[in-house]
């Protein structure tokens, strides 16, 4: 009815012609792309030093491979996972992508990651040259991702608070018992009993859960999960003893509390906590704080057991990469996992090389701050998560029940184990 | 062609123009609002996890919600926010507006002060309040309590005090809006009624109950409906004031919207999150329908 208002009438043939022209215009860049340099996309989350490191690596890589261009995309951490998860299935997004190792299972299952092929990713070589924890990325004999860097835990202590309490500032606690003793001596409360200085930072929202699962549980004689990672096993006398030791820091010894001075890691950072367990990625941030004189040591031992929790971000190739892009992606992935790239990553980011030979150099082992983390890598374990976030919540709730509702440790652990087992079952049943 | 030749009546032409102008918002709403809403109804019956293809699984998501204790905790919390939040906020807002209406000195300035929180970003407000609630070396509220000899309160760190602590902030944030609406409502009541009441010798109390409140009825209904919807979808304050935005400690502050958010963007169970969203949608629909029905009764 309104057609008469428009003087220029479009015939059906014209519409088709227009569409064809538009399609040709859209297709054109692809045709040109085949002749010019290959462009691949690399995705990671925004973390200043990581971005800087990758930019430097891309520059070197492009100099060596002039016909490949790498486009570097970053997103804030809070959106990163959603972005990746929605982009790849839609056929958009990265050719090479950085994923937290605990997320990888979902991607492999949905056929969104390619198994790594070629000489650079020979499984036997990776098995031999990388730290054993990287083997969590292997499915049916093939690797689906390799990390540039790994992170482990270490003990950090505030030397000024040691001196103030009359302790030797160069002698950190080597055992869990010494940890408690020293923490008690450095805890201060005001007249009303409020904590003003914590002997120990308590950070279930930080790295403490990794410390509990892979270190404390083992040190008290147990193991957190079955070897095939399908069964929760910390609901055992050792798991309960380990949780008792941890929550006693809050309830019995009263050397610290969750959220003291605000969000983690505020307590240690502001010099109000004497001891803490944290990851290698924190070293750079702490070193930049004026007046924070801290030391780094290997985690305290108990019952002669040493253990450590390691985690990492892996680089994988998305299913979307094919043909020339796949070749370029493989080349780039191989490049960012060379020993040289790892050395650069250590210097710029402060995360530890994932190859044994690159990590265990005399200079690294004797480094006052990175050394203890690197030594810890040798005996570290990476938890096999199926859903990292909900699995974390389960244990955080267990600690809150003990702390806030005085639930007995055994009951709280039993409840947590049942809840986590449900998560594992749901994942493996699917 | 014969159709085109016929002249268009004035009415049709006006309608066409109206539609032409409406086209943009209609397309916008269909694409940005209605289509995703309908899609959420579809997703509610699937096991979509964002990564893999969705599979149709019938009512399994709804059964799961029914059997999930955390869902019921979040549900109960949501109603607690609603049941406490709406009456308290309306009462406070009315009291402030009623007296502010009688104040001439610095009226505009005081009104602006009350309205200020409404303009503030919820995230910024949440974080500031979170710090106010901290224990002594950091938290001002506890320092004041300590100075006057009252015991320290855990506020956000206790399972019993956390929800009211969050609620206070949510009420405070919305107060400015409600006060301004109440003020407008009060001003709209003709002065003649009050003069007549005065001549008849009515007390202040009688004037309030017999004139002011009955005549504020449309304003009240509007604020109850808007307030209820607001408290039913409370999210920002809880997300920003609890550790890692988890609605803790131990789910004690978790509203249903945060539960949906966590299912969707922390566990990536999009299908399940959509199912709970559908439940929340139906609950809101029923509550709003009841409120409007009650409002119609004379």
Image (cartoon, coloured by chain):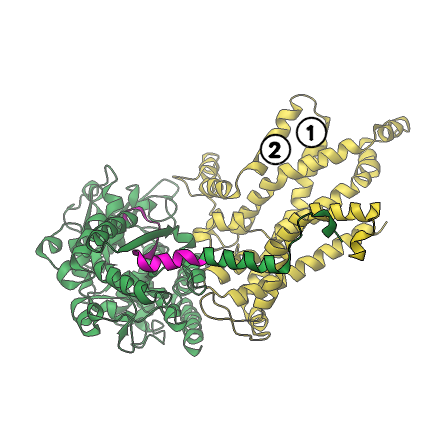
Chain colours: A green, B yellow
Q: In the rendered view, tell whether residue B158 sits above or below residue B152.
A: below
Q: Pick whichever of labels 1 and 2 is earlier in the sequence.
A: 1
| Callout 1: SS | helix
Q: Is residue A28 left or right of residue B175?
A: left
Where is mark 2, residue-wise?
Answer: B114
Residue at 81% across, 39% down: B215
Q: Is residue B289 left or right of residue A185?
A: right
Q: Is residue A86 left or right of residue A61?
A: right
Q: Chain of mark 2?
A: B
Mark 2 is surrounded, within 10 Å at the Cα level, by few (under 14), some (14 to 19) or many (20 or more) other residues, namely many
Q: Which residues are magenta?
A: A27-49
Q: In the rendered view, tell whether residue A79 sits above or below residue A428.
A: above
* Contact flag, marks 1 and 2 (Cβ < 8 Å): yes
As rendered, which of B88 and A26 lies closer to the eye? A26
Answer whether residue A48 is magenta in the image: yes
Q: Which mark is residue A417?
A: none
Q: Which mark is residue B100?
A: 1
Q: Quadrant of the N terminus of chain A?
A: bottom right
| Callout 2: SS | helix
Residue at 44% across, 73% down: A422
Answer whether residue A375 is magenta in the image: no
Q: Quadrant of the C terminus of chain A?
A: bottom left
Pinpoint residue B247: horizontal percent, then vertical percent.
Answer: 49, 55
Residue at 17% across, 58% down: A374
Rounded to the nearest angstrom, the CA distance separating label 1 from label 2 is 10 Å
Residue at 60% across, 57% down: A14
């Amino acid at each position: 009815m309104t057609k008469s208002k428009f003087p220029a009438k479009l015939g059906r043939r014209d519409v088709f012609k227009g569409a064809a022209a538009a399609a040709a215009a859209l297709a054109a860049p692809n045709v040109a792309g085949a002749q010019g340099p290959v462009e691949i996309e690399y995705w990671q989350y925004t973390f200043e030093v990581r971005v800087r490191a990758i930019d430097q690596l891309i520059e070197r890589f492009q100099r060596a491979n002039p016909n490949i261009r790498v486009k570097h995309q970053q997103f804030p951490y809070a959106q990163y996972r959603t972005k990746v998860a929605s982009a790849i299935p839609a056929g958009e997004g990265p050719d090479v992508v950085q994923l937290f190792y605990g997320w990888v299972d979902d991607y492999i299952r949905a056929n969104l990651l390619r198994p790594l092929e070629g000489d650079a990713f020979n499984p036997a070589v990776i098995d031999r040259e990388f730290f054993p924890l990287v083997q969590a990325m292997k499915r049916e004999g093939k690797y689906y991702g390799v990390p540039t860097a790994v992170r482990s835990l270490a003990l950090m202590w505030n030397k000024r608070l040691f001196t103030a309490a009359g302790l030797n500032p160069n002698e950190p606690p080597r055992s869990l018992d010494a940890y408690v003793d020293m923490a008690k001596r450095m805890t201060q409360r005001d007249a009303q009993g409020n904590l003003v200085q914590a002997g120990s930072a308590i950070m279930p929202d930080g790295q403490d859960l990794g410390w509990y699962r892979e270190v404390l549980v083992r040190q008290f004689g147990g193991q957190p999960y079955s070897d095939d990672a399908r069964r929760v096993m910390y609901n055992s006398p050792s798991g309960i003893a380990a949780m008792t030791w941890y929550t006693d820091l809050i309830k019995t010894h009263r050397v610290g509390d969750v959220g003291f001075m605000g969000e983690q890691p505020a307590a240690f950072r502001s010099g109000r906590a004497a001891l803490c367990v944290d990851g290698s990625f924190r070293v750079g941030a702490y070193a930049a704080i004026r007046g924070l004189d801290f030391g780094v040591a290997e985690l305290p031992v108990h019952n002669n057991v040493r253990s450590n929790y390691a985690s990492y971000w892996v680089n994988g190739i998305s299913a979307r990469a094919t043909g020339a892009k796949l070749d370029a992606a493989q080349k780039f992935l191989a490049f960012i996992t060379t020993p040289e790239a790892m050395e650069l990553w250590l210097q710029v980011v402060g995360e530890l090389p994932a190859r044994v030979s690159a990590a265990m150099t005399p200079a690294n082992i004797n480094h006052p701050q990175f050394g203890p983390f690197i030594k810890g890598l040798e005996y570290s374990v990476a938890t096999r998560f199926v859903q990292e976030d909900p699995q974390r919540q389960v244990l955080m709730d267990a600690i809150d029940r003990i702390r806030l509702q005085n639930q007995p440790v055994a009951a709280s652990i039993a409840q947590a184990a049942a809840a986590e087992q449900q998560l594992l079952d749901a994942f493996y049943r699917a | 062609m014969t159709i085109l030749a016929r002249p268009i009546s004035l009415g049709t032409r006006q309608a066409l123009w109206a539609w032409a102008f409406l086209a943009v918002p209609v397309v916008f709403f269909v694409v940005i609002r209605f289509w995703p809403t309908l899609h959420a109804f579809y997703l509610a019956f699937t096991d979509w996890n964002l990564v893999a293809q969705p599979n149709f699984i019938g009512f399994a998501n709804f059964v799961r919600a029914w059997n999930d204790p955390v869902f019921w905790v979040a549900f109960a919390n949501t109603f607690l926010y609603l049941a406490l939040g709406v009456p308290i906020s309306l009462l406070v807002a009315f009291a402030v507006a009623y007296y502010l209406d009688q104040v001439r000195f610095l009226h505009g300035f005081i009104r602006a002060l009350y309205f200020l929180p409404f303009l503030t970003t919820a995230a910024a407000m949440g974080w500031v309040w979170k710090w106010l609630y901290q224990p002594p070396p950091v938290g001002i509220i506890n320092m004041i309590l300590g100075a006057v000899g009252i015991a320290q309160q855990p506020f956000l760190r206790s399972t019993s005090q956390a929800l009211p602590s969050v609620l206070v902030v949510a009420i405070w944030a919305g107060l400015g809006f409600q006060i301004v609406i109440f003020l407008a409502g009060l001003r709209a009541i003709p002065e003649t009624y009050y003069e007549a009441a005065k001549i008849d010798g009515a007390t202040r109390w009688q004037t309030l109950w017999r004139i002011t409140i009955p005549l504020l009825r449309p304003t009240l209904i509007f604020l109850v409906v808007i307030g209820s919807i607001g408290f039913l979808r409370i999210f920002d304050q809880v997300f920003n004031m609890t550790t890692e935005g988890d609605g803790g400690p131990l789910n004690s502050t978790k509203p249903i919207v945060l539960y949906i958010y966590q299912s969707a963007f922390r566990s990536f169970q999009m299908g399940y999150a959509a199912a709970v969203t559908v439940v929340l949608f139906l609950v809101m629909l029923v509550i709003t329908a009841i409120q409007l029905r009650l409002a119609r009764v004379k």
